[in-house]
Amino acid sequence: MTHHILSIHAHPDDAEILAGGTLALLAQAGHRVTIVTMTPGDCGSMEQGPEEIAAIRRREAAAAAALIGAAYACAEFRDLSIFNDDSSRRRVTELIRRQQPTLILTSSPTDYHCDHEATSTLVRDACFAVSCPNYRCGEAAPLPGIPHLYFMDSIEGRDRDGRPVQADFAVDIGPEFARKREMLAAHASQREWLQRQHGMDDYLHSMEEWTRARGQSVAVRYAEGFRQYKHHPYPVTPLLQELVGDRLRR
């Protein structure tokens, strides 16, 4: 059985950094993959204006997704302007209804960036709402049930106070690491921005360090960590764990 895997994170490059290898693995297994960013990364430049850099980053995100045969879409929020309010929840609910995913990967509830945390909350609550017929958002029909929901790692695997954020499990992405790196490299406009704003000399190197650290925690070279959201009434069956098969690491 094939599934539709929907990755929803805040900005172009977030999904590639935190789940690119797993998405590549799932796409290679024949599953449909769609990568959604909440914003087009309109504040991610020191030189270009918001519309100019947003257009560049949408193209980069689509090119990165295409490397694994995935689709790309943007929810068209704006950087630093994602908030957990009614209109935002309805927009995300409508987006999920239109995509009709079986399984959703989204950002960690605790992370260094307000857009990451707001995305996590909105996606979690929209997953509950997608099957409520009286929660009307647009033209898309309600889904028959709540999709399986998983949180990706936070950046560096830490919360805002530097404490480790533990994963429920990890996925060995050793064979997919080169493709993950290629996907992230497609976001070329971010090299200078991340150096100046984040102090990262090489964003590809930083990603590799974080992916290697998660791998070391489960005795493989490279891995990506995930947590399954299991609160009532979300699905608790281990769908992602089953889909990654023998790549699952505890």
Image (spheres, rainbow, N blue to C red):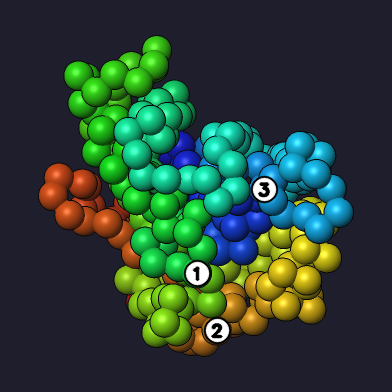
Do we see residue 82 in this rendering? yes
Q: For the point 48% across and 45% down, which residue is it?
A: 82
Whether residues under marks 3 and 1 lie with C-beta atoms below 8 angstroms apart, the answer is no
Cα distance in 3D space between marks 2 and 1:
18 Å
| Amino acid of disc 2 | Ala
Say whether disc 3 or disc 2 marks the residue closer to the N-terminus. Answer: 3
| Amino acid of disc 3 | Gly
Query: In the image, which disc is placed on residue 231?
Result: none
Q: For the point 62% across and 63% down, which residue is it?
A: 17
Query: In the image, which disc is placed on residue 112?
Result: 1
Do we see residue 29 in this rendering? no
Q: In front: 158, or 44?
A: 44
Q: Which residue lies under the disc numbered 3?
A: 41
Q: Position of residue 229 (x, y in %)?
A: 27, 56
Q: Which residue lies under the disc numbered 2?
A: 213
Q: Position of residue 108 (x, y in %)?
A: 41, 62
Say whether disc 3 or disc 1 marks the residue closer to the N-terminus. Answer: 3
